[in-house]
Amino acid sequence: MKSAYANPTYQFHIPGHTKGKAVYKEFKKLIGEKALSIDTTDEFDNLGTLHPATGPIAEAQELASKAFGAEKTFFLLNGSTAGNLAIGMALTKKGQKVIINRNCHRSALTGLMISGAEPVWVCPSRIEDWSVWGNIEVSKIEQALKENDNVGLVWITNPTYEGVVSDIKAISEVCKKYNVPLIVDEAHGCLWNFNSHLPETALKLGADAVVHSLHKTGGSMSQSSMLHIAKNSKINPDTVEKALKLLHTTSPSLILLGSLDASRAVLQSQSGQKLIDRAVKNAKYLRKRLDNIPNLHQLKPSFGYMTDVTKVFIKIDGLSGKRLESILEIDFGIEVESASDIGVLILCNLGNKRSDFVYLADALEKIANADHKDIYYLENRKHMPMLEPIIKMSLRDAYYSEKETIPKEHAIGRISAEVIAECPPGISILLPGELITEAHLPYLNDYKELEVVKTL
Ligand SMILES: Cc1ncc(COP(=O)(O)O)c(C=O)c1O
């Protein structure tokens, strides 16, 4: 990329802004001329192609597979979403069953809607005090494998958005016993292979394929992710690549691909190791400070599950997470990753300095010691239901059924025809094919109407 930039050519091809020349002045000033001048797609400037992978792009994927300990790595545009779509499309078939956790990301659902495979829902444990899903118990996976024939995949999310970690080794052993491939959506765990204080990556624990959102915590640009096929995987990489070719844009952004290569280079380097080490140490510092605030609580490892130390989920007595989030933002200029009705999620990132955490801990101390009134509690806003879904129709059939849109209050007893899953964390409140019950209503405050399967 550097040499393409240093040797500019006369350009008569896409993208038509022609190295930034036809770009709105203010925008150019904002993002910089240089960024626009390297905004090209594959095929040009001898930078290789993504599908099939050739040239420097193929080399960069190869380097990534070595760094992450995979047999083969595919660069993803449109995030891990693209990886999950490709997994569903390439590795499952209509009518086949897929054992999957209820709190999967909506992109996994979409993958199954493409293929027509049937999810067998496994509900993880519930961490009721925090209103979040916990770990996936291996016994539940084994039970589902025992009770179902024609299982194409076991597909699980690890860690959860809030950093709860399941026992992947035990789950992979069960999958091997039943000879079913294991896919792990490790979107939030791309740093794990690079630091011994973080959990072990599923690529080392027997998963067949793993998805990583490098852009979430790995330092690459938004939308850039990776899909790894593990060593000794049961999965044929060619099948996955064929699906990716169909799902991906035909104009891949070289900036995004380059940023994946750059983040791999950082994570592997000594300076990158130092950054991860600093993030872990900062997380420990923050957690220690928070331990000394009496009415502030943090989600910690407990019996049955571990946590990723860099994801700090906290709550303060008498304050909803939403309220805490707005106090942090308005009064202190602090932006957190997300807020639920219970708490806020803080990510200890590679780019944060120790002074950031000192400021954050001081701010939380002040908030915890002040007498804030919480209007959100009065509104009774609810974030994420943890219900056992009552499935009345297949996922795909419901999604493609004849639908009608009706007021939410009239939808109880009807079958959802849509995915309702706001981001973050992109976990569905309602799935196509799921019975809508009164228990869903507190979580649907933002919806006046729902799309349901039309009754004849
Ligand atoms: C568990 C999980 N998988 C997949 C995704 C999709 O990732 P991306 O935003 O990279 O498309 C997310 C996004 O939040 C996620 O939380």
Image (cartoon, grey):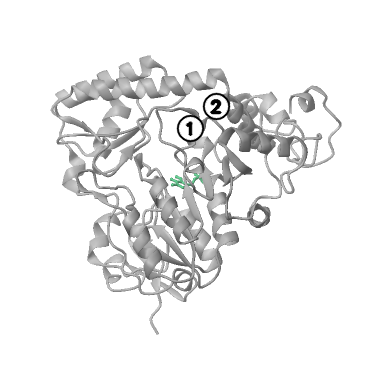
Where does residue 340 sit, x and y in percent of width and height? Answer: 29, 43
What residue would you read off at disc 2? 267
- Cα separation, mark 1 vs mark 2, equals 8 Å
Of callouts 1 and 2, which one flags the residue occurring earlier in the amino acid sequence? Answer: 1
Is 143 left, or right, of 272 in this rendering? Answer: left
* Residues at discs 1 and 2 in contact (Cβ within 8 Å): yes
Which quarter of the figure has residue 424?
top left
Q: Is residue 381 visible?
A: yes
The residue drawn where x is 64% and y is 24% is 32
At 73% from the left and 34% from the top, the residue drawn is 22
Give the percent coordinates (x, y) of residue 170. 39, 49
Amino acid found under the numbered disc labelled 1: Leu
Give the answer, above or below, for where 115 lies relative to 329: below
**Image quadrant in which the C terminus is located:** bottom left
Residue carrying label 1: 191
Say which of 304 and 345 sits in front: 304
